[in-house]
Structure formats: structure tokens, C-alpha cells
Amino acid sequence: QVQLVESGGGLVQPGGSLRLSCAASRTVFSIYTMGWYRQAPGKQRELVASITRGVGTNIADSVKGRFTISRDSAKNTVYLQMNSLKPEDTAVYYCNAHKPIDSTKSSDYWGQGTQVTVSS
């Protein structure tokens, strides 16, 4: 059973910062692309940022310049540094591990989700 263990969510004022962490098994971490998704109430889950094994990154336009994704291979952990947070960043954030199998299938694992609330 693959586990992705998230931490770091909470309540923060607009303009503040939070760092999310997601720890994975070494096997998953070494071969999967790691990412963060978020889902706000009444909205679809959306990709926030992802990082490949080769540390190539993909950042959503809505958070570009404010959020940074990184990975620490020694700790098998991926981080999402969130700065200049806005109320519209409020959502449940999910860690994801993704590996394509073929052109139509993929292997995906999800964390349990961590709430991020941006409010004064």
C-alpha cells in the first residue's frame, strides 16, 4: 500500500506563507512525478504544480511567481512553498504521485489532503 503523508496546512492571513510537505516511500519517490493538486468547494480538482525525477517543474499560471515546488531525494519528500497567499488559494491540497503506463493509462497515488485556508 503506497502512502503519501502530507503536512503543513492551516489558517493564514492574506499575504502570508505556508509550506506543505509530502513524504513518500523511496520506491515511489524515485520513479514517479510528484505534484500538488487542490480542490476548492464546488470546484474541480486542479493541478497546482508538479516536479519530475529530473526536477523539471510545471507551475499553474494562477500561482506562478508565488508558489514553488521542490523535492528532497534524501528525505523522499516533495514540498510546496506558498507565498503571497490569497483568499482564492483556499482549498484542500492533495499530494499526487504519477507515472504514465502507456498513452491512455497511468498509475496515480493520492495523499489524504490538507486544508489551506487564507482569511483575515
Image (cartoon, grey):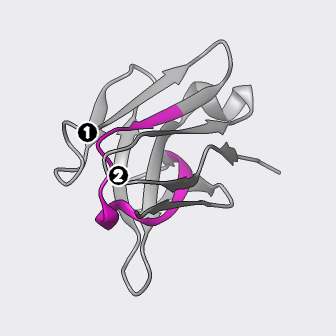
Between 40 and 103, the one nearer to me in the picture: 40
Q: Quadrant of the C terminus?
A: bottom left
Relative height, residue 30 to residue 92 (above, below): above
- Quarter of the figure with residue 115: bottom right
Q: Position of residue 25 (x, y in %)?
A: 74, 33
Foreground pick, 109 / 112: 112
Q: Is residue 77 above or below residue 85?
A: above
Q: What amino acid is labelled 1 in the image?
A: Arg
In x, y percent, where is residue 117? 48, 63
Which residue is denoted by mark 1 in the rendering?
Answer: 66
Q: Residues within 10 Å of mark 2 (few under 14, many from 20)?
A: many
Q: Is residue 22 above or below residue 1?
A: above
Label 1: element kind: loop
Q: Which is nearer the eye, 25 or 22?
A: 22
Q: Which residue is depicted at the point 41% across and 54% down?
A: 13
Q: Which residue is mark 2?
A: 48
Q: Which residues are magenta?
A: 79-98
- Quadrant of residue 109 in the image? bottom right
User: Relative to residue 117, is residue 25 drawn left or right?
Assistant: right
Residue 31, image x and y in percent?
A: 56, 30
| Predominant SS of the magenta segment | strand
Q: Looking at the image, which residue is at 70% across and 46% down?
A: 4
Q: Residues within 10 Å of mark 1 (few under 14, many from 20)?
A: some
The secondary element bearing badge 2 is classed as strand
Is 94 inside the magenta-drawn segment?
Answer: yes
